């Protein structure tokens, strides 16, 4: 295992049996892993963490203590050590601001109450509840029930199968990639492979976990700002091109091919260039692991697009090859693009990591209405984007309950909380953003 840098110190975690498994350890190698570390340990005692880290501290002059990306040598956020005077708080201290510490303490108190009610640990309480697992089971059964008819070529499944797949998948693979399904790292990792119509897990970890979550909307660090740069301009830091003049119209067809690109085109671009969207340096994998990855992509491509041509006529085969993946892509784009790409969120910054997560996020929907519950289910909780970015390792089933806490703390500390009434309102803001950035 290669070293990682956390709060200006280098650590070689070789031999450490991390409860979250080896996946996150691999993602953090030869990086400034401070943001990843803080985001995934908000409710763990600092003394406990420091005791472990001290055992694995290594000499920075070691030849292995190098960055995959030279931009990691400059810290994007300020991490001041702040200690609460409330001895009963959780955590006791943290390298965060008073705003961030109050957030962690109050959400931690909510989880402590949940843990006591269920008779489990705080960390266990933050993962999927029995009720959430029951919902996942129900969604999985609905999806599986459509498969026999889908393989048989029944037309109604062109919509039903990808839609039920999306509802099942988004409630599994997203939380899994953030280690929010279970305390068992293997359950989380297997959960990411539910996204076969969506994205390669390896690519998704680079795009979403390493890049986007650590550095949301930060130019040249967040890869989500630079998707389809020839046709779409999401930040003023991207040079205006002629095609951007039409982006208030061209975004619609692009939404139909987004997940196809993530699944099959982005892996090629990523390994050829060594970066994901010029923003995230690729983890150093063995040659065997890279070959395994591309063999997996070939298998997934066959399962998604090739098999219909062995069973149906050419026209019908194209329909069963292209319509499902386009519908899944549309569902994903509806659920994700409005979360950060609005005029209120783009090109804004804070050197406080937690404030930055709030300022660049956008939550929408009211769980007290049927429409709000449907949006929450359809997006897998992504509509609570601010809450998710503040605490990515918490299962989305908890996000509606911590939203009032987050809004109260934001109001107290005068931190702008961007919220829309529903999905329609959020989409209007996205369209306005695309229009405003279509001109130089």
Image (tube, rainbow, N blue to C red):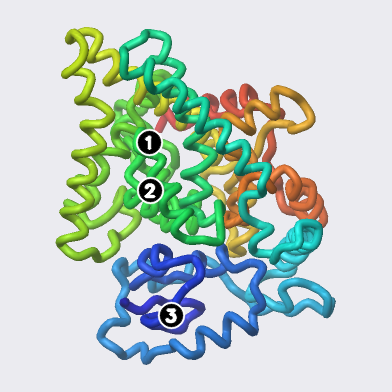
What is the CA distance from the residue labelled 1 to the residue labelled 2?
9 Å
Point out residue 214 in the picture as x, y percentages from the top left corner: 49, 58
Mark 1 and mark 2 in contact? Answer it, CB < 8 Å. Answer: yes
- Give x and y (percent) for residue 34: 50, 71
| Label 1 secondary element | loop
Is residue 250 at least partly visible in the picture?
A: no
Q: Position of residue 150 (x, y in %)?
A: 36, 18
Residue 255 can be seen, yes or no: yes
CB-based contact (under 8 Å), mark 3 and mark 1: no
Q: Quadrant of the C terminus?
A: top left
**Which mark is drawn over residue 16?**
3
Circle nearer the N terminus (3, 1) = 3
Q: Secondary structure at mark 2?
A: helix
Q: Which residue is mark 2?
A: 204
Point 29% across, 17% down: residue: 320
Residue 197 sits above or below residue 431 on the image: below
């Amino acid at each position: 295992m290669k070293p990682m840098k956390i709060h200006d110190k280098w650590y070689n975690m070789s031999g450490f049996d991390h409860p979250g498994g080896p996946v996150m350890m691999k993602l953090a190698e030869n990086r400034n892993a401070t943001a990843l570390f803080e985001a995934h340990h908000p409710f763990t005692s600092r003394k406990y963490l420091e005791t472990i880290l001290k055992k694995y501290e290594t000499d920075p002059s070691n030849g292995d203590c190098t960055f995959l990306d030279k931009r990691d040598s400059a810290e994007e956020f300020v991490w001041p050590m702040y200690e609460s005077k409330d001895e009963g708080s959780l955590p006791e201290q943290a390298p965060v601001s008073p705003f961030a510490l109050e957030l962690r303490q109050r959400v931690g108190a909510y989880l402590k109450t949940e843990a006591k009610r269920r008779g489990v640990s705080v960390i266990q309480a933050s993962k999927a509840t029995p009720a959430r697992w029951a919902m996942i089971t129900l969604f999985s059964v609905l999806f599986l029930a459509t498969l026999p008819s889908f393989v048989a070529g029944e037309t109604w499944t062109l919509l039903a199968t990808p839609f039920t797949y999306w509802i099942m998948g988004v409630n599994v693979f997203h939380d899994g990639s953030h280690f929010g399904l279970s305390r068992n790292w293997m359950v989380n990792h297997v959960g990411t492979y539910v996204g076969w119509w969506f994205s390669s897990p390896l690519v998704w970890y680079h795009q979403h976990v390493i890049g986007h979550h650590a550095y949301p909307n930060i130019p040249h660090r967040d890869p989500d700002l630079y998707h389809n740069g020839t046709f779409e301009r999401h930040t003023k830091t991207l040079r205006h091109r002629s095609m951007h003049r039409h982006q208030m119209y061209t975004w619609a067809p692009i939404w139909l091919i987004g997940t196809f690109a993530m699944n099959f085109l982005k892996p090629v671009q990523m390994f050829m260039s060594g970066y994901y969207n010029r923003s995230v340096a690729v983890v150093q994998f063995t040659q065997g692991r890279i070959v395994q990855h591309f063999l997996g992509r070939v298998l997934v491509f066959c399962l998604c697009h090739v098999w219909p041509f062995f069973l149906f006529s050419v026209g019908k085969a194209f329909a069963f090859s292209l319509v499902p993946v386009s519908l899944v892509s549309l569902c994903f784009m509806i659920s994700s693009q409005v979360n950060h790409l609005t005029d209120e969120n783009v090109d804004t910054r804070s050197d406080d990591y937690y404030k930055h997560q709030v300022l660049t996020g956008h939550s929408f929907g009211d769980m007290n209405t049927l429409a709000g519950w449907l949006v929450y289910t359809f997006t897998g909780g992504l509509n609570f984007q601010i809450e998710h970015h503040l605490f990515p390792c918490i299962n989305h089933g908890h996000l509606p309950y911590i939203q009032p806490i987050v809004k109260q703390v934001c109001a107290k500390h005068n931190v702008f909380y961007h919220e829309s009434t529903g999905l329609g309102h959020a989409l209007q803001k996205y369209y306005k953003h695309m229009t405003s950035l279509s001109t130089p």
